[in-house]
Image: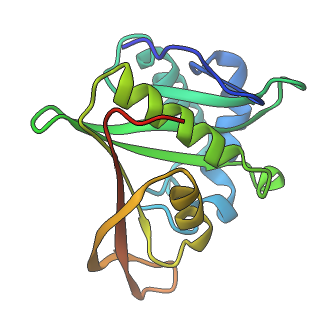
Amino acid sequence: MLSRTLETERLILRRYEEKDINTLLEILTDKRLTEYKLVSYEDLTKEEKINLIKDWIRKSKTSLTEKWVIEVKETHEVVGNIVVNNVIRKPNYCNVGYAILYNYWGNGYATEALKAVSYYLLNYRNYYLVECSCNENNIRSIRVLEKSGFIKDGYINNRRINKDGTYSSVVYYSKKNKISL
């Protein structure tokens, strides 16, 4: 599925392109961004990470899992990404994940991008529900979800392993169809 370009007041959300490799590599390697991630790419070499990103770019032209970079309209700087991680055909929902480069935290970019993507997925792609999940300790991400109109559905206790070897719960949030910005 070709991810449609989406625009907000301050952002352009567009498909991955070759010119985004360095930014996407930074998202994969910055420990501040990966602290709470379920999937880690720490064991991959830099070359393997670049090849993975190139594969994402190639597949973004045909994949059901849509991927966008988050670009600031005014400066054309890529400040993060937002992706549909999983599509569950029955009962027709998807899971969305996002990351903002550390230097751009606190500007509301994640909230603005998540609102636009969830609106698009619910109203144009006709998903019944858009879901996001995160580590219970990821307070910043929980704030983004709540500001974006997502409702807490529940959690699964002790599901994610932390960097220190302890376990944390996964918190689930969702938004249902036919919503407005």
Residue 143, image quadrant: bottom right
Q: Position of residue 118 (x, y in %)?
A: 45, 36
| 60 w.r.t. 37: above or below | above
Quadrant in which the C terminus appears: top right
- Please tell me which residue is depicted at 41% across the width and 36% down the height of the picture: 179
| 151 w.r.t. 119: above or below | below
101 left or right of 103?
A: left
Q: Nearer the viewer, residue 147 or 92?
A: 147
Render colour scheme? rainbow
163 left or right of 74?
A: left
Q: Residue furthest right?
A: 75
Q: Position of residue 98 (x, y in %)?
A: 54, 46
141 left or right of 159?
A: right
Is residue 48 among what the camera can see? no
Q: Position of residue 58 (x, y in %)?
A: 47, 15
Residue 91, image quadrant: top left
- Please tell me which residue is depicted at 58% across the width and 21% down the height of the picture: 16
